[in-house]
Amino acid sequence: MECECICPEEQDIPLGSLIQMVALNDEEVLTSRTLWSDKVLAKAQHACQHGLDIARIILVLREEAKARGLIHL
């Protein structure tokens, strides 16, 4: 999947790879800098050429990480 690189300094996982990791149920995505970057979140809405709402996906993943106790905010 091709998604624009929107904040290279805050992304340790490109957005396309993040989506692939979700599809593979890779828990590493839940602790990535990409997932927890507010800059990435703000710009993610228009990052996918295929119309995926990546900003919404990021918010759901953040909630999942919190629910699993992986992140304590």
Image: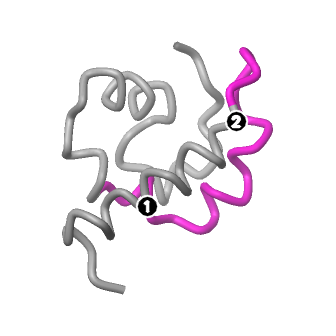
Q: Residues within 10 Å of mark 2 (few under 14, many from 20)?
A: few
Q: Residue at x 79, y 37 (%)?
A: 46
Query: Residue at horizontal 44%, vertical 53%?
Result: 34
Amino acid beneath label 2:
Asp
Whichever of callouts 1 and 2 sits on the residue coming sooner in the sequence is 2
Percent x, y of residue 10: 48, 59
Q: Residue at x 59, y 52 (%)?
A: 7
Tell me if residue 50 comes above or below residue 15 in the rendering: above
Relative placement, left or right, of 59 versus 18 is right
Q: Residue furthest bottom?
A: 73
Q: Which residues are magenta?
A: 32-52
Residue 53: numbered disc = 2
Q: Nearer the viewer, residue 49 or 9?
A: 49
Relative to residue 37, is residue 38 drawn left or right?
Answer: right
Residue 37 picture location, percent across and down: 51, 65
Within the image, what quadrant is residue 69 found in? bottom left
Label 2 sits on a secondary structure element that is: loop
Question: Which amino acid type is marked by label 1?
Answer: Arg
Quick check: is 9 in the magenta stretch?
Answer: no
Examine the image and state in which quarter residue 24 appears: top left
Q: Main secondary structure of the magenta part?
A: helix
The local crowd at label 1, few if under 14, some if 14 to 19, many if 20 or more residues have their Cα within 10 Å, is some
Query: The C terminus appears in which quarter of the rendering?
Result: bottom left
Residue at point 22%, 63% (across, down): 68
Relative to 66, is 50 on the left or the right? right
Q: Please name the residue that numbered disc 1 is placed on.
A: 62
**Above or below — where is 5 with respect to 3?**
below
